[in-house]
Amino acid sequence: MTDQQRQADAVFRDLFGRPPVLAAAAPGRVNLIGEHVDYCDGFVLPMAIERETVIVAAPRPVVGGEPIARLHSTAFAETVELPLTPGTGPPAAAPGWSRYLAGVIAGFLDRGATIPAFDAVVDSTVPLGGGLSSSASLEVAMATIVATLAGHAIGPLEVAQLCRRAEHEFAGVPCGVMDQCASVLCIRDHLLLLDCRSLAVMQVPFQRPDLRVLVMNSNVRHALNDGGYAARRADCQRAAAILGVPSLREATLAELEASRGALGDTIFRRARHVVTEIARTLDAATAIAQDRWAELGELMAASHVSLRDDYAVSCLELDLLVELAGAQPGVIGSRMTGGGFGGCTVTLVEAARADAVMAAVARGYRQGTGRECTLFTTRPAAGARLVWLPAS
Ligand code: ADP
Ligand code: MG
């Protein structure tokens, strides 16, 4: 058992008076390149991080009445009871965090699964709300538990789609499918090249054991965030409509240039980001597979500039983190990652230099903003998996 599983196990025994029998783990993710293109049918290149949600669980004999799940989150120090009968949604007073879980349960019930009564404890080392997709890791870990308890056959892509639907319909977050796919499908020491149109995936080997991925959280979240995201999506739809294509995936840079007048400057620049970012993501996957790391660094830098200038979703804090990292020896590439207006940057760094880079960036960020950033290094980690716990 890992330390995290042991802790969740202890909480479970404490609360429910017996040991759990199975555990599921599902990681958070960081996107190396391919930003704001998932909703335009583009390509993204995420990887799982060494931070994950662990759920330990055990079925419970039902003594009359309808089956329910008792679910405890260590993050919220709260236990909820959710019905497992088709047609009964979560209680109106159920806390926000439990809606993600209710959504996953509803997804399985809709598929005709019979879910036995069970108890579970949720514990996560993914920071909540930090842009590293604690929400997808929560959904995917839950789906892994429910599929097993229900004895319900479901493929990995179906799990990702079920979880995404849970997030859309129960948590009210209109996310793309990247996060859930990454949490389900990633494998250790690989990046996941995901075609957001077909959901075809390619595992891209990350062959350099001497490199680390450095995740830095600016710890700011500008209020623009929500409206900004919807506005960008709308801009992309308008661009596609003007160009007469189903999505910007189908547009070329030459077509954009030819329609520059019809698009207008702002929509043109938004579309240019998407079209060039899709190309950069494919180039990045090739560069990694062919061991051309300097080229990857240039692609990451160009991605940041495009997000900052054409897509206008960066902010001073993210720009500063990228600039500080880029000035350090041993850094191969750095860019903002996630929706923007705050959140995280992702940086590729030589392992031997990682501590020095982290210290220098933290110092510079404090001097430049008066704020603290949070940072950690990771290797591309494993996707969701199930573990049967030893009897004890
Ligand atoms: P991110 O996915 O980037 O971490 P979100 O806002 O999408 O941020 O998701 C965070 C939300 O997901 C939390 O506020 C909570 O509702 C839910 N969540 C994530 N992890 C847990 C957990 N371990 N226990 C309970 N709820 C969680
Ligand atoms: Mg999320």
Image (spheres, helix red, strand yellow):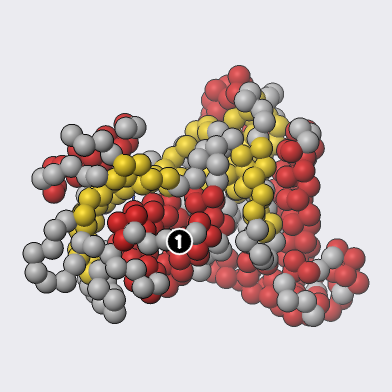
- The location of residue 39, given as percent across then percent down, is 63, 66
Placement of 215 over or under 91, stated as above or below: above
Whole-percent x, y for residue 345 in the image: 59, 43
For label 1, being within 8 Å of ligand 2 is answered no
Q: Residue at x 47, y 37 (%)?
A: 50
- Horizontal side, residue 116 vs residue 381: left or right: left
| Position of the N terminus by quadrant | top left
Give the camera-side residue of 128 and 40.
Answer: 40
Image quadrant occupied by the C terminus: top left
In the displayed structure image, the side of residue 214 where residue 261 appears, left or right: right
339 on left or right of 235: left
Q: Residue at x 14, y 47 (%)?
A: 15
- Can residue 322 be seen from the camera position used here? no
Secondary structure at badge 1 equals: loop
Disc 1 residue type? Answer: Ile
**Residue at (34, 68) in percent of width and height:** 113
Counting from the top left corner in percent of width and height, residue 210 is at: 63, 23
Q: Is residue 22 visible?
A: yes
* In the foreground, 137 or 228: 137
Label 1 crowd (10 A; few <14 / some 14-19 / many >=20): some
Residue 187, x across and y down, in percent? 55, 41
Could you tell me how many numbered marks the image carries? 1
Q: Residue at x 77, y 43 (%)?
A: 286
Hey, which quadrant is residue 109 in on the image?
A: bottom left
Q: Looking at this rendering, what residue extends furthest in the top direction?
A: 352
> Seen in the image, is 261 located left or right of residue 83?
right
> Disc 1 designates what residue?
154
Front in this rendered view, residue 121 or 230: 121
Residue 36 picture quarter: bottom right
**Above or below — where is 185 with respect to 259?**
above
